[in-house]
Image (cartoon, helix red, strand yellow):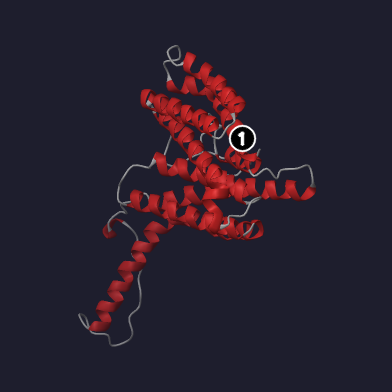
Amino acid sequence: MDGRGIESVLLGLEASWAKPRIWLGPAWAVLCGGLASGRLGFNGWTVLVLLLSLFLGDPLLGTIWREASAMASPYNPTSLSERSKARLSPPPYTLPGSLADRLFRWAEERLSWWSSVWPRFEAPLAGLAFALPLAFLLAILLGQSVVMLIAVALILVAWESLRLHGGREPSLLLRASYAGGMAWLVGYLAFRPLIPQVALQRHGEAILWALIYTGVLYAFQSIDKGERDEGIRLLNLVQIFGVAVLVLTKEPILAGVVALLLLPQMLLQPVLKRGRVYLRRTQFFALMGMMVGALAVAI
């Protein structure tokens, strides 16, 4: 998986999120969150809110992550002697070495530098100029809770951008939190606004399953990156934790369903030695397990 992130499976936009081989991505997270709200129904309002949530949580947030990451990646422009220098005409009678002359030489240097990096920033800036206002517009339509959530998501984007600008590798955990947990909560909060005074009481289980989803997506990304053994161990632990949560919340039948969905994954682990082959064969079971967890929140 490259630094761009996770590819959108909803639309043919260049709003990239997860590579197509990882279907456990933001679109499924939004669907799980919407189901967990317990307010999905077959009416026009519900369908509209769900579609807006899907568009916000998948391609729009994906575009913001990708373009911000592209702008923050380290870049070494060519030296001034190797690129076309900008030429400014100083005012008449400007003496060499004077303050005005130094000011114009500085402006030439800055303009030359900008002309060298502008081709790199042009496309990302255009993408952000499209995605950011539209994301906040949709968030406003979906409610104040979603607006606050998008603000938190942008903090994650800024955090990742600072890491990339400092020359560090892309963070799989930040990406999974953004594409998994944030998208899950977009679907949930679009139907059930957050009430701060009773957040833990009313929304604690939903937040917990958003974290479980994040953990599963992080494990999948680790496997896809080549860290097969570590990723599979984490994948097992996160799903076992989900089973334990269902038992503790007095949902033994659903806990049994998630455990049964985990069983074929574990049986195939010794057989499928290549991580990406394992993903293709088993991620359907994890998809269904996350949906069952969302159903447990709703009932």
Give how far across and how far down residue 229 sits, in percent.
37, 23
Q: Nearer the viewer, residue 149 or 101?
A: 149
Tell me where residue 94 sits by quadrant: bottom left
Q: In the image, is residue 26 above or below residue 227?
A: below
Q: Nearer the viewer, residue 196 or 71?
A: 196
Asked whether, in this view, residue 76 is left or right of residue 71, the answer is left
Q: Is residue 27 visible?
A: yes
Q: How many marks?
A: 1
Q: Which quarter of the image is occupied by the N terminus?
A: top left
Give how far across and how far down residue 66 sits, in percent.
48, 47
Asked whether, in this view, residue 134 is left or right of residue 234, the answer is right
Residue at left offset 42%, top offset 24%: 232
Q: Nearer the viewer, residue 138 or 215?
A: 215
Q: In the image, is residue 160 above or below residue 262?
A: below
Residue at left offset 43%, top offset 31%: 219
Q: Which residue is mark 1?
A: 296
Q: Which quarter of the image is occupied by the C terminus?
A: top right
**Residue pushed farthest bottom?**
93
Residue at left offset 74%, top offset 47%: 46
Q: In the image, is residue 246 above or below residue 188?
A: above
Asked whether, in this view, residue 110 is left or right of residue 258, the answer is left
Give how far across and how far down residue 266 sits, in percent.
47, 17
Give how far across and how far down residue 10 sits, in percent.
63, 39
Q: Which residue type carries mark 1?
A: Ala
